Image: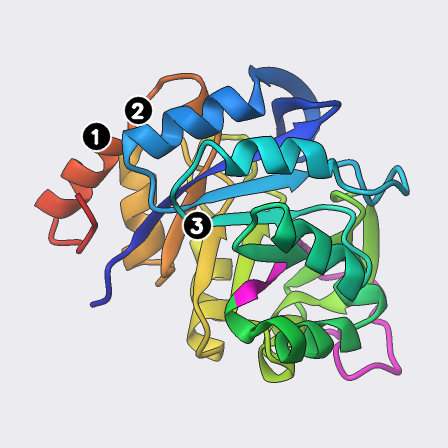
Amino acid sequence: MLTKRIIPCLDVTGGRVVKGISFVQLRDAGDPVELAAFYDKEGADELVFLDITASSDHRDIMADVVARVSEQVFIPLTVGGGLRNLEDMRRILESGADKVAINTSAVQNPVLVKEGARKFGSQCIVVAVDAKRRDSQAVPLSGSPVAVDKNSKWEVYIHGGRTPTGVDALKWAKYVADLGAGEILLTSMDADGHQTGYDNELNRTVSEAITIPVIASGGAGTIEHLYEAIVDGKADAVLAASIFHYGTFSIKEVKLYLGAKGIPVRI
């Protein structure tokens, strides 16, 4: 088993880190630069920075904040939110990011995934998939090879979880993997912020269907939840926010627990 990564997530809006429940009811969690420096010293394997209102507000990502964050961390930094084209990707990578995460722009223009992988390398392209369970009685869409159908369990949302797309999450993950994405950041909108555990049916379904790494996101409330996402959800990495931001657990506590359970982690 390859080493599993522990990744804190900084959801940023208005220059502050926030955390919500199912993408709403946001509350302040601190300064992104200070938190980034803290997690770097704590032993996080990577850091994810998401400007969660850039796409819905139709504005550019806060490159100045990204630059200040990158100055404080010496671990891989993934940045997403409001990246619409190759120039946006280039600008953020030059600001200090190691990877870029795209969601809205990828759904609206899938060729961007392929172009980004070709220009910057697949290892730099993370496709963020915000997935929500579908009502089994919902009317299926048609016409697209990635559209939801009567068998679809999860639908992709964009604009920070505000807009349903009619795209089936599993088909979409397979599709962008084929286009050249290097990783999937998979967030369960249903579990996000509730701290009752990850949606491991979603994580496992996607992980078993593709060969690129899957980062499980949404629902961590205990250390056991991270273990379950790796073992039951078959995730390659686990992302969490609330349990780290509010001091419920430290990175070290998580890694010691996982190591004792036989999960390979970087101590």
Residue at point 39%, 42% (across, down): 74
The residue labelled by disc 3 is: 76
Tag 2 and tag 1, C-beta contact below 8 Å? yes
Q: Secondary structure at mark 2?
A: loop
Looking at the picture, does residue 54 appear above or below residue 15? below
Assess disc 1: are there few (<14), some (14-19) or many (≥20) residues with their C-alpha within 10 Å of its C-alpha. few
Residue 135 visible within the image: no
Quarter of image, res 139 = bottom right
Q: Secondary structure at mark 1?
A: helix
Q: Nearer the viewer, residue 173 or 147?
A: 173
Majority secondary structure in the magenta region: loop
Color encoding of the figure? rainbow
Residue at point 21%, 40% (across, down): 255
Q: Mark 1 or mark 3, which is nearer the start of the sequence?
A: 3
Assess disc 3: are there few (<14), some (14-19) or many (≥20) residues with their C-alpha within 10 Å of its C-alpha. some
Residue 253, x across and y down, in percent: 21, 30
Q: Secondary structure at mark 3?
A: loop
Quarter of image, res 211 = bottom left
Q: Amino acid at mark 3?
A: Pro
Segment colored magenta: 124-150
The residue labelled by disc 1 is: 253
The residue labelled by disc 2 is: 249
